[in-house]
Amino acid sequence: MLLQLHPHNLMLLWLHRHNLTSYTEQITLVGVTAQSISYQTESCQLFCVRSNKTAVTGNAIIASRQSKAPPIPEEWGFYAKTFECTHAGKYAPRGEGQRPHQNVRPLGCKAQINLCVSIKST
């Protein structure tokens, strides 16, 4: 799945999907990082999901650490996602010959967005 969104809009879309309209009341945005947010805005760079962390896994970590943090609602599905540029990674040729007009996506781009939400204790 390819996304063509600014990181802030991406987070708002994710929150809206989970019926969380305000991240100041219920959740805190822990991290939205990217190599260059202005570059993403200007170029409409495409990002794809690289990894997910499920609410079940997050709750298991909370329980194993005997943390006082409230459990993550399982209906969220995921509490963290990592998006990377579609040009990330190294090109690995898989054949010996060459075919004309074949574009290669992996160019070693390091642009990445890390999204993580947590519940604020009230």
Image (cartoon, rainbow, N blue to C red):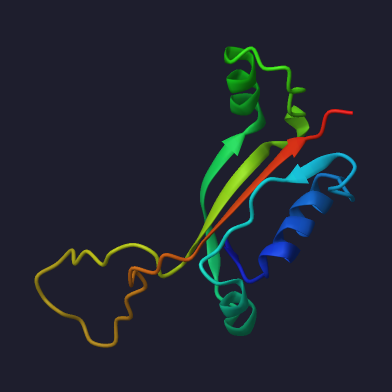
- In this view, the residue in front, 32 or 48, is 32
Where is residue 27? Give x, y as percent. Answer: 80, 41
- In this view, the residue in front, 72 or 92, is 72
**Residue 119 placement, left or right of 95:** right
Where is residue 25? Give x, y as percent. Answer: 90, 42
- Please say if 25 is above or below 3: above
**Residue 7 placement, left or right of 100:** right
Q: Quadrant of the C terminus?
A: top right
- Please say if 83 is above or below 111: above
Q: Which residue lies furthest to the bottom in this view?
A: 101
Q: Which residue is drawn at 22% across and 64% down?
A: 92
Q: Residue at x 57, y 79 (%)?
A: 39
How many numbered markers are drawn? 0
- Please say if 10 is above or below 54: below
**Residue 35 placement, left or right of 99:** right
Q: Which residue lies furthest to the left in this view?
A: 96
Where is residue 91? Give x, y as percent. Answer: 26, 67
Task: Tell me which corner region of the image, top left, top right, bottom left or bottom right, holds residue 97.
Answer: bottom left
**Residue 106 placement, left or right of 46:** left
Q: In which quarter of the image is the N terminus?
A: bottom right
- In this view, the residue in front, 104 or 64, is 64
Where is residue 104? Give x, y as percent. Answer: 32, 76
Task: Tell me which corner region of the image, top left, top right, bottom left or bottom right, holds residue 87.
Answer: bottom left
Q: Which residue is drawn at 67% across and 64% down?
A: 7
